[in-house]
Image (cartoon, rainbow, N blue to C red):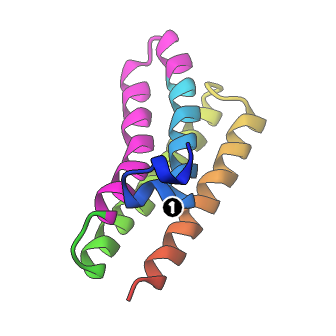
Amino acid sequence: MADQDKLFRFENLEVWQRAADLAFDLGIIADSIEERRRFRYAEQLRSAALSISNNIAEGSGSNSSAEFRNFLNFARRSTFECASMLSMFRRQKLVADQQARSLLLELNEISRMITALSRSLV
């Protein structure tokens, strides 16, 4: 999408773009887990994954930096929730080790990006 086509502030944030991509990837894992009839696990993963990008987006519409930081805190906490779930899914052999490792590295990087964005807000 070209920059002039972007209507909302969050669409220009690399951290939101990466979080949205990650939510898509975690959604694929949720679909796989759902096929194994682990419906609650799948729904929880989808919810936590979407919470990252959604809280970044919602916070970007805030009228104050303090309010935006609160939403970024929620987003960052959701990265930890996803990381915990992936770790558990790996233990249960619901996700391959290498796939989990790759996603955990991306979650860690997104978490760091959220922290940096939060600190940059005046």
Q: In what element is the residue under mark 1?
A: loop
Residue underneath mark 1: 13
Q: Is the C terminus in the top left, top right, bottom left or bottom right quadrant?
A: bottom left
Q: Residue at x 59, y 53 (%)?
A: 107
Residue 99 percent location from the top left of the image: 72, 35
Residue 10 percent location from the top left of the image: 42, 58
Q: Is the N terminus in the top left, top right, bottom left or bottom right quadrant?
A: top right
Tell which of 15 and 108 is nearer to you: 15
Query: Range of the magenta residues?
Result: 31-60
Q: Residue at the right extreme? A: 98
Residue 103, above or below 118: above
Q: Residue at x 57, y 26 (%)?
A: 29
Name which quarter of the figure residue 73 lies in: bottom left
Residue 72 percent location from the top left of the image: 38, 66
User: Relative to 33, is 38 on the left or the right?
Assistant: left
Asked if the stretch drawn in magenta spans residue 94, the answer is no
Q: Residue at x 50, y 68 (%)?
A: 114
